[in-house]
Image (cartoon, rainbow, N blue to C red):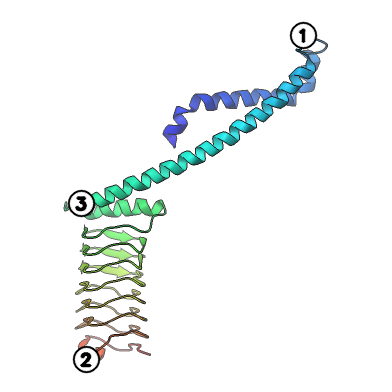
Amino acid sequence: MKYWLYELRIPILALVLSGTVIIAVTGRWSWVSGHVFPNTTWGLYSKEFFENVLVEAHGMILDLLVIGLVAYLFQRRSERSDLKKQVLRDLEDLRHYRGSDAGYRIYGELRRLSSLGVKKVTIATARINDVSLEGLDLVDSSAQGVVISKSSLRDCAFTGCDFDGAVFLDVRAKRTTFRGAKLVRAKLVGARFKGCDFSGADLTGADFSNADLSSAIFRGANCTRTKFDGAKLRSANFVGATGLSEELSSIAADAKHIKMK
């Protein structure tokens, strides 16, 4: 936007100056007409002629303002669309990047997309390491095979996202939701997801062994073949969950106050 305004600085300045002069003359017309055009006429140039000119000039300024505003809005929309496409391309390239700063750069692109209102992205097979992810809000995004390690999730929402085969290594999450997400065959061994919300998620074959899931919510989740061996499930909510083939109290490290009904 700044570059566009800079390129049009001369036309904008001319419009502002001419508009200022026209408005000033119109506002002081009684004085101007009395001193500049008292009784002077030259052909068609008369007081009435210049009055009509001023009226037409006001209409011209209004037209230019409307046209300029419409052009500006279209320009902004085009720039925003181009920026979204560029950031999405950058994110696509980073999915295959394995540098030590991959996680930081991917998080930066996700934040930029969030500021642009983009919630559906693709980060499948990406590697996100040693990053504190905060405030991410993704919907129906593709994250199959993503590996998140030595990182934290805070105030994030992954509604309906596909984490099929994803791996969470040494990950801590707070106030994070996976409502309706797909975590089929996902590995969350030893992860700390206290109080996280997995309502309606598909957890078929997921491995939560030795994970801290205290007060986590699994309402209506599909827990078919889901492993909770050694997991901390104190006060976890499994109301409406399906596929639980074993007594959680017999395999969990802490199963006190679990809600099943």
Task: In the rendered view, tell whether residue 63 sits above or below residue 203.
Answer: above
Point out residue 118 in the picture as x, y percentages from the top left corner: 39, 55
At 54% from the left and 25% from the top, the residue drawn is 13
The one of 256 and 165 positioned closer to us in this rendering: 165
Quarter of the image that includes the C terminus: bottom left
Question: SS of the residue at dot 3?
Answer: loop
Circles 1, 2 touching at the beta carbon (< 8 Å): no
Q: Which residue is mark 1?
A: 43
In the picture as drawn, the residue positioned furthest to the right comes out as 39
Circle 2 crowding by C-alpha within 10 Å: few under 14, some 14–19, many from 20:
few
Q: Nearer the viewer, residue 134 or 240?
A: 240
Q: Is residue 111 visible?
A: yes
**Disc 3 marks which residue?**
101
Disc assigned to residue 20: none
Amino acid type, label 2: Ser
Q: What is the three-letter code of the residue carrying label 1?
A: Gly
